[in-house]
Amino acid sequence: MGARAKSVLSDAEQVQLAAELAALGARLQVLETETTLSRERLLRLYKEVRGVSPPKGMLPFSTDWFMSWMPNIHASIFMNIYKYLRRHTALEGIRAALRAYRLYLEHVEVHGLERVLSFTRAWMLLRFCDGKLLETAPCTKCGGHYIVHTVDLHHNYVCGLCNVPSRAGKTRKLPGSEQSPADVAIAA
């Protein structure tokens, strides 16, 4: 196979990856980081896949978003899926992140939950964990692993599901239900 054939195949793989990321709502900065395609091509591809121009602005940069109650639960679900895939499959990098995110979306749908974690937030979570700003710690009550700040003490950590904050999930009821999102998340 000649160099030209390889470059065409490589280009096709990059376009496919960028299309998958755009379809999941990844921000343009994610596409730029994870592919070798030019910004102009990514803009055209994004518009073609999503039907709109990509949102402008900076990527989420604070680890604190992952510490609030519902985002922490969803980020922890995603991270546990991601870690499982890394341990038990040959998936790596962005391919592992894509598969983990799709499984997260499936979990949310099966349990009738609202999607809290966008792909861009999930991608940032992985970057924060790679940068040792965030990690997972086991809950001393349920044994589940949850996202925590790396610098915090985790010796007697109790998760947000075992110690639900008084106002967690009380903002609205699910449509056609007497249950709040907190009740559904705890049941799941």
Image (spheres, helix red, strand yellow):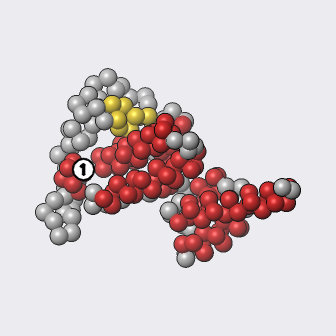
Residue designated by label 1: 188
Total marks shown come to 1
Residue at point 21% right, 48% down? 186
Image coordinates of residue 108 in percent, x first then y, are 33, 57
Q: Is residue 151 left or right of residue 55?
A: left
Query: Which residue reaches farthest top?
Result: 155
Image coordinates of residue 175 in percent, x first then y, are 21, 69
Q: In front: 59, or 75?
A: 75
Image coordinates of residue 78 in percent, x first then y, are 41, 47
Q: In front: 186, or 83?
A: 83
> Does residue 166 show up?
yes
Q: Is residue 90 left or right of residue 79?
A: right
Q: Is residue 111 left or right of residue 124?
A: left
In the picture shown, does residue 74 fall above or below 49?
above
Residue at point 55% right, 56% down? 58
> Does residue 168 show up?
no
Q: The residue tagged with tag 1: helix, strand or loop?
A: loop
Q: In front: 182, or 62?
A: 182
Q: Quadrant of the N terminus?
A: bottom right
Q: Is residue 124 left or right of residue 161?
A: right
Q: Amino acid at mark 1?
A: Ala
**Circle 1 crowding by C-alpha within 10 Å: few under 14, some 14–19, many from 20:** few
Query: Which residue reaches farthest left?
Result: 178
Residue at point 42% right, 53% down? 103
Quadrant hosting residue 21: bottom right
In the picture shown, does residue 38 fall above or below 96?
below
Image coordinates of residue 113 in percent, x first then y, are 29, 58
Residue at point 46% right, 49% down? 100
